[in-house]
Image (tube, rainbow, N blue to C red):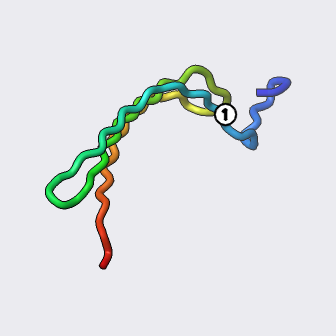
Amino acid sequence: TYAGVKDDTSAGQLLTLGPNLSLMTKLGPLPVEVQVQYSLPLMGKYDSAMSTLSLQLKFFGKIY
């Protein structure tokens, strides 16, 4: 709110901090990368602060 009036046109701002862990290995003939990331919100404005945990699997191949 600004001067008692709600302002819905303001952009959300969020500052997060978090570690990530990445592992590259071979699964058969294909290289695979596994990445785990955690995000902890520190402060925000006009945005909801939620912790997130994400897992990414990346498969790499060769095109002949």
Q: Which corner quadrant holds the C terminus? A: bottom left
Callout 1 secondary element: strand
The residue identified by callout 1 is 13
Q: Which residue is drawn at 61% across and 33% down?
A: 47
Q: How crowded is mark 1: few (under 14 residues within 10 Å), some or many (20 or more)?
A: few
Q: In this view, does 28 lie above or below 42?
A: below
Q: Which corner quadrant holds the N terminus? A: top right
Q: Which residue lies furthest to the right in this view?
A: 3
Q: In which quarter of the image is residue 52?
A: top left
Query: At label 1, which amino acid type do we have?
Result: Gln
Q: Is residue 27 left or right of residue 9?
A: left
Q: Quadrant of residue 62?
A: bottom left
Please state the horizontal and vertical placement of residue 32, each as a whole percent of the image.
Answer: 27, 51
Q: Residue furthest bottom?
A: 64
Q: Which residue is drawn at 34% across and 40% down?
A: 35
Q: Is residue 28 left or right of residue 37?
A: left
Please state the horizontal and vertical placement of residue 10, each as a whole percent of the image.
Answer: 74, 39
Q: In this view, does 48 lie above or below 27?
A: above
Q: Which residue lies furthest to the top in this view?
A: 42
Please state the horizontal and vertical placement of residue 45, each as a whole percent of the image.
Answer: 67, 28
Q: Is residue 13 left or right of residue 42?
A: right
Q: Is residue 20 left or right of residue 32?
A: right
Q: In which quarter of the image is residue 34?
A: top left
Q: Which residue is drawn at 46% across and 29% down?
A: 39
Q: Total of numbered circles in the picture?
A: 1
Question: Of 25 and 34, which appears nearest the observer?
Answer: 25
